[in-house]
Amino acid sequence: AQSVTQPDIHITVSEGASLELRCNYSYGATPYLFWYVQSPGQGLQLLLKYFSGDTLVQGIKGFEAEFKRSQSSFNLRKPSVHWSDAAEYFCAVGANNAGNMLTFGGGTRLMVKP
Amino acid sequence: NAGVTQTPKFRILKIGQSMTLQCTQDMNHNYMYWYRQDPGMGLKLIYYSVGAGITDKGEVPNGYNVSRSTTEDFPLRLELAAPSQTSVYFCASGMTGSNEQFFGPGTRLTVL
């Protein structure tokens, strides 16, 4: 069975600084990987996804993520954080033979200092 | 398209009461899911459905029931509410073969 670990429960960055949120997954074959963002009181919105091909994936709101098979990682990055990026971020992994199931990490809460 | 809609947004229940959380999607997705979200625990799958008339248990099904009589609707039933069911509940839907899921805005449930 697949699993996802997000090692950082909370991260605080200054506005304008760069951001990297870590995600490590466990799965025997090539996974489908996702990053979702949840603003306070809202549902989850898809930021980006990786199915195959180019390992650097561009998403909405200026985010990108890189799939590194050798490290079983799919870290999320943004070069310059805005105050509106404060939210909770979830990494998720799916398997192409698992009936569309997703396994979510525990989430990373991002706080942005002015 | 409204996407995935959930009602109610908030609800307070007393122990032992029952209620149904409603979920509707207008994207003609065959897959639908119910999750609960507890602080620091990510999302845990309660039940899912691969199409009308077909449902199956997820990771944490105890205390809940579901039905799927149409493609659009996937209600979640709590029969005897317990304080452990205090949580935020999310409904999601998806298409066959993509794993991508589209989420509703959630229902915040408190059981006192």
Image (cartoon, coloured by chain):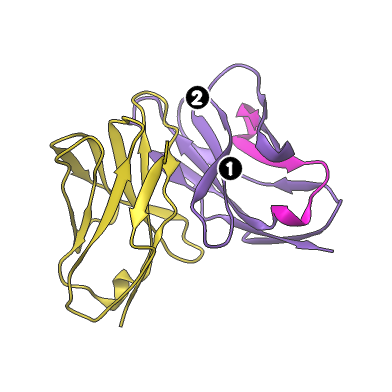
Chain colours: A purple, B yellow
Which quarter of the image is occupied by the N terminus of chain B? top left
Asked which quadrant contains residue B38, the reply is bottom left
Disc 2: which chain?
Answer: A
> At label 1, which amino acid type do we have?
Asn
Q: Residues within 10 Å of mark 1 (few under 14, many from 20)?
A: many
Disc 1 is placed on an element classified as strand
Q: Is residue A97 above or below residue A1?
A: above
Do marks 2 and 1 share a subunit?
A: yes
* Residue B112 falls within the magenta-colored stretch: no
* Residue A77 falls within the magenta-colored stretch: yes
| Residue A1 in sight | no
Q: Which residues are magenta?
A: A67-85
Q: Are marks 2 and 1 in contact (CB under 8 Å)?
A: no
Which numbered circle lies on residue B112? none
Q: Is residue B6 above or below residue A29?
A: below
Disc 1: which chain?
Answer: A
Residue furthest to the top in view is A53
Residue in view at x 51 percent, y 64 percent: B40
Residue in view at x 46 percent, y 61 percent: B41
Asked which quadrant contains residue A94, the reply is top left
Which numbered circle lies on residue A24? 1
Residue in view at x 73 percent, y 41 percent: A77
Q: Position of residue A81 (x, y in %)?
A: 79, 49
Q: CA distance from mark 2 to mark 1?
A: 13 Å
Q: Position of residue A24 (x, y in %)?
A: 58, 42
Q: Position of residue B84 (x, y in %)?
A: 31, 73
Residue nearest the viewer, comparing B22 with A5: B22
Residue linked to disc 2: A30
